[in-house]
Amino acid sequence: MSSTGRPYGRRGGAPSYVPRPRASSAAAAAPANPNPRPAQQLRKPVFTTVERLRPQSHGHTLTARVLSARIILDNPPPRARLAECLVGDNTGTVLFTARNQQVDLVKPGTTVIFRNAKIDMFKGTMRLAVDKWGRIEVTEPASFQVKEDNNVSLVEYELVDVVDED
C-alpha cells in the first residue's frame, strides 16, 4: 500500500486500472482453441407434402398455395393477431394458423414456403403452425394444381392409451 492507504498508489479522484502483464510470446503463438469443431455444412431442405403430415410431428418444410385466409383475432400490434388459412399443394390441403406478422404474409393466392413447421392438434384435428424457430417465405407462384378434395384437417384423431399385456 502507498502512503495514502490506497492500493497501487492511487491518489484521490476517479478510479484507475492497473495494466495486466502481457502473456509470453509462446502462449500468444498458440491458437486460442487447439481443437475447434469443424464448420457444419448446411443440409439441403427435404420438402414434404401435405398428405405426409402426421399428428404431433415437427420439422416440416413444404411449399403450399394459400387458398383462403380468415382473420380470427385482430388486436393492435402489442397484442396478438390470429388468422386461419387454408393452404395446399398437389396432394391435399391443411389449415394453417398464422400468428402476428405471419398474418401479413399469407394472402389468398400467394405461394409460400413453410420451414421448420409443426403440426399442432386442435380439438382432435391437425393444424399447421410455424413458431419462433420456423420461417415463412413468400415465393414465386407455384406450377402445381391444388388438390382441394383431400383436406387432412378434417380427419379427427383420438389419443388412445395402449396397455402392453404380458
Image (cartoon, rainbow, N blue to C red):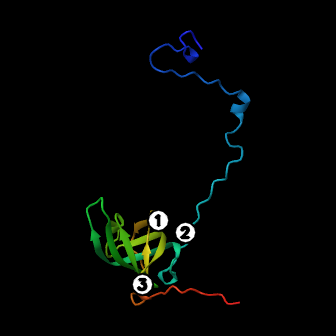
As drawn, 70 above or below 132: below
**Disc 2 to disc 1, C-alpha distance:** 13 Å
Say which amino acid is labelled 2.
Pro
Which x, y percent locates residue 36?
Answer: 68, 48
Q: Could you tell which of marks 3 and 2 lies nearer the N-terminus?
A: 2
What SS does tag 3 mark? helix
Which x, y percent locates residue 72?
Answer: 29, 74
- The residue pinned by badge 1 equals 134
Which x, y percent locates residue 132?
Answer: 44, 63
Viewer-nearest of discs 2 and 1? 1
Say which amino acid is labelled 3.
Ser
Which x, y percent locates residue 37?
Answer: 67, 52
- The residue pinned by badge 3 equals 153
* Residue drawn where x is 45% and y is 19% of the image: 14
Determine which of the numbered discs, if any, sits on residue 45 in the image: 2
As drawn, 16 above or below 88: above
* Residue drawn where x is 48% and y is 21% of the image: 15
User: Is 18 situated left or right of 131 in this image?
Assistant: right
Find the residue positioned furthest to the right: 26
Local crowd at mark 2 within 10 Å, few (<14), some, or many (≥20)? few
